[in-house]
Amino acid sequence: MSQVFKALSDPTRRRVLLLLRRGPMSAGELSDQFDVSKPTMSAHFAVLREADLVHAEKAGKSIIYHLKLSVLEEALLGFVQAFELGAEAPPKPQEEAAR
Amino acid sequence: MSQVFKALSDPTRRRVLLLLRRGPMSAGELSDQFDVSKPTMSAHFAVLREADLVHAEKAGKSIIYHLKLSVLEEALLGFVQAFELGAEAPPKPQEEAAR
DNA sequence: GAGACGATTAGCTAATCGTCTAATTGAGTC
DNA sequence: GACTCAATTAGACGATTAGCTAATCGTCTC
């Protein structure tokens, strides 16, 4: 959970996810959309993989990244629901935050 | 937007928000729920204020923190909606991520 | 096998983060 | 005014982060 939010806290990584929202793209194609060096982008990809927000698939020389939309939605919606108004019994915070 | 996600990337701060979900609490009451020092908690409160997720209200010697639920929900739900399946026209990532 | 090319790893710097103790501020009380 | 108590600020420390260049690793094509 922390890793998802940390991944989302960087604008570059959010933009990568939004690009992948349209469909899979290679590391190089993604990097071309940004002004930073390829190694830097590679590090961002690693953070996204670590958070399980993307899937990397080898394709010859290239690596194709896919957005894992279900993981993203589950993480965010799950957290939003913990805060929803109208809940009968407020949850125990220790347990909630640990998830 | 980045600030909200950064604020949420720390488990301690998420737990603070969940505690405030039940109702306003003073800085000291909140700190008592955690094993870290008060100055450390004070720093966490500052991050949450910076992200506009809480409101601080002076009450004599104490400071009462309130959760700004609307800010939290708007930030998270707004982002979730940008990724919703079934959207007709995928958004332009540069603009989306900048918000 | 020798290049060429896509991508990552290695190694570095500067900046930020989470934590601590000690000192300071501000508000109430004797 | 002097004391007490709640909270923050100041300053330090180790760990992590985002960024760079240079080097390395895989895979494809002559």
Image (tube, coloured by chain):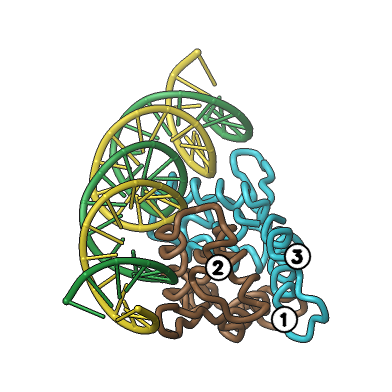
Chain colours: A brown, B cyan, C green, D yellow
Q: Quadrant of residue A8?
A: bottom right
Near mark 2 (Cα within 10 A), the count class, few <14, some 14-19 or many ≥20, is many
Q: Does residue B11 appear left or right of residue B66 in this picture?
A: left
Near mark 1 (Cα within 10 A), the count class, few <14, some 14-19 or many ≥20, is few
Q: Which residue is mark 1?
A: A87
On residue B41, which mark appears?
none
The chain ID associated with circle 2 is A
Q: Which residue is mark 2?
A: A30
Identified by mark 1, the residue type is Ala
The residue at 44%/75% (across/down) is A49
Q: Position of residue A87 (x, y in %)?
A: 72, 81
Label 1 and label 2: CA atoms lie apart by 41 Å
**Mark 3 or mark 2, which is nearer to you?**
2
SS category of the residue bearing label 3:
helix
Q: Does residue A15 appear left or right of residue A40 in this picture?
A: right
Near mark 3 (Cα within 10 A), the count class, few <14, some 14-19 or many ≥20, is few
Identified by mark 3, the residue type is Glu
The residue at 69%/50% (across/down) is B55
Between B47 and B38, the residue placed more toward the observer is B47
Label 1 and label 3: CA atoms lie apart by 18 Å
Identified by mark 2, the residue type is Leu
Q: Position of residue A95 (x, y in %)?
A: 49, 78
Between B57 and C13, the residue placed more toward the observer is C13
**Mark 1–mark 2 CB contact (< 8 Å):** no
SS category of the residue bearing label 1:
loop
Q: Which residue is mark 3?
A: B74
Residues tagged by mark 3 and mark 2 found on one chain of the structure = no
Looking at the picture, does residue B58 appear above or below residue B18? above
